[in-house]
Image: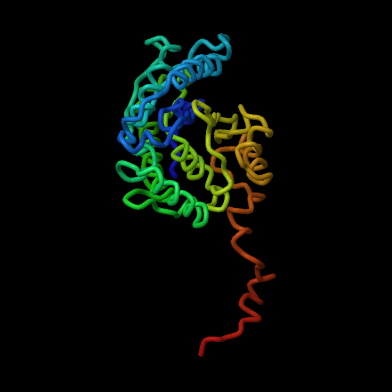
Amino acid sequence: MVHPQHSSLLPKRIILVRHGESEGNLSESAYTTTPDNKIPLTPQGIAQARLAGHQLRSLISGGGSAADWRVYFYVSPYERTRSTLREIGRSFSRGRVIGVREECRIREQDFGNFQVEERMRVVKEARERFGRFFFRFPEGESAADVFDRVSSFLESLWRDIDMNRLHIDPSHDLNLIIISHGLASRVFLMKWFKWTVEQFEHLNNLENCEFRVMQLGDGGEYSLAIHHTEEELRKWGLSSEMIADQKWRADARRGEWNEHCPWYLDAFFDVFAESDDNAGEGDDYACA
């Protein structure tokens, strides 16, 4: 991923928000008669979104101590995410919002069209045995498919920032708020931080209207460990090594390589040759 050259235009925060409680969260029977994209929020979900708006504004404004800040929203086209955005928006004045973009690539994982409840229960049990990342729902998507389109969105996001399509004023702290779904948010983080499939499988889903804050460190790298505690990261399913990497990122200079991060290299090999001279020794075969 190519990072923008102008560090002054980097967003201070990229915040991933899951939608509020929906009718589908209350009962999966909702999907048998209503298309997934039209599932609405419950009254509880609306209240959660309004509360999230207050929490986000407090976070971004530093409890009122920060003066020069703006927000830009990306939102999934689903009814429950659009409704979540509307309720969150109640906490922000028009002058604070640079803009909003509906983004289809951060929509929910496709599970097929109308879902038969009993059939989906059996399919989801099969997913647990097969593995959550590569299992593809009949007539739907796998998490790997979602990863591909979210990766495409990420590249577009960086181009927006690099070309200043968001009209960023360098004197303002920009905060990108991405209102999406649980799986899309997890694969976004997986892509960003280069987590492996095995690490993804251990991640826990976000609760309704829960959010993850990726904050820009002094060196120019984003980290979850600036805003969130180690206890939170562990609760979300991050391993000790993943948490250590987040702490390293909090102070790392942009573009630096974390040599102590095993899934960048060491985890893929059992042993290296001691030197170039004995590389390949001990093989059971040789080229004729």
Q: Is residue 159 left or right of residue 265?
A: left
- Residue displayed at 56% across by 53% down: 198
- Residue displayed at 48% across by 45% down: 191
Query: Residue 16's spot in the image, x, y percent?
Result: 48, 30
Residue 14 in sight: no
Q: How is the image coloured?
A: rainbow
Q: In the rendered image, which quarter is residue 236 located in?
A: top right
Viewer-proximal residue among 244 and 8:
244
Query: Residue 98's spot in the image, x, y percent?
Result: 37, 18
Residue 107 in sight: yes
Viewer-proximal residue among 48 and 287:
48
Extreme-front residue of the structure: 118
Q: Is residue 195 left or right of residue 271?
A: left
- Residue displayed at 58% across by 10% down: 65
Residue 132 lies, with reference to residue 38, above or below; the image says below
Q: In the rendered image, which quarter is residue 240 located in?
A: top right
Viewer-proximal residue among 182 and 212:
182
Q: Is residue 220 left or right of residue 72?
A: right
Q: Quadrant of the N terminus?
A: top left
Query: Residue 90's spot in the image, x, y percent?
Result: 42, 12
Residue 137 lies, with reference to residue 57, above or below; the image says below
Residue 126 lies, with reference to residue 186, above or below; the image says below
Extreme-bottom residue of the structure: 288
Query: Residue 262's spot in the image, x, y percent?
Result: 64, 53
